[in-house]
Amino acid sequence: MKIQEIREIAKRMNITVNSSKTKLDLIRDIQVTEGNSPCYKAIANCGITDCLWRDDCLSKKK
């Protein structure tokens, strides 16, 4: 998902969006707002299958 799409999702959730927040920051803020763990790119073997970020997260592991 592109950064602009992520910014739009964050804005709809009333999350502060500014140019200093990275894609990682915004996704983790969204995860917390949804009541989830801010785990984007932090778990090697994620078992959560209904996460909006799953494909993006698992596609480019660090």
Image (spheres, rainbow, N blue to C red):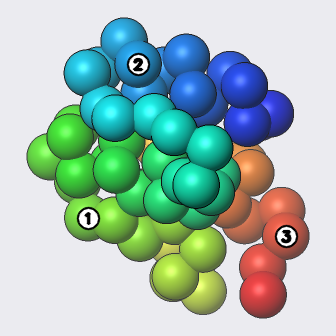
Q: Which residue lies at the image location 72% right of the left edge and 65% below the top edge?
A: 58
Q: Which residue type does callout 2 highlight?
A: Lys
List the residue tagged with mark 3.
60
Secondary structure of the residue carrying tag 1 is: loop
Q: Residue at x 60, y 86 (%)?
A: 44
Q: Which mark is residue 13?
A: none
Q: Residue at x 57, y 28 (%)?
A: 7
Quadrant in which residue 20 is drawn = bottom right
Under circle 2, the secondary element is: helix
Q: Earlier in the sequence, mark 2 or mark 1?
A: 2
Position in image of residue 38 (x %, y %): 34, 65
Picture coordinates of residue 60 (x, y %)? Answer: 85, 70
Q: Amino acid at mark 1?
A: Ser
Q: Which mark is residue 11?
A: 2
Q: Contact, CB < 8 Å: mark 3 with mark 1?
A: no
Q: Are marks 2 and 1 in contact (CB under 8 Å)?
A: no
Query: Is 22 displayed left or right of 62 in the figure?
Result: left
Among numbered discs 3 and 1, the one appearing first in the sequence: 1
Quick check: can you spot residue 37? yes
> At label 3, which amino acid type do we have?
Lys
Check disc 1 and report the residue beneath it: 37
The tag earlier along the polypeptide, 2 or 3, is 2
Separation of marks 3 and 1 at Cα, in angstroms: 19 Å
Quadrant holding the N terminus: top right
| Residue at 20%, 40% in the rendered image | 33
Q: CA distance from mark 2 to mark 1?
A: 19 Å
Image position of 54 with respect to 13: above or below? below
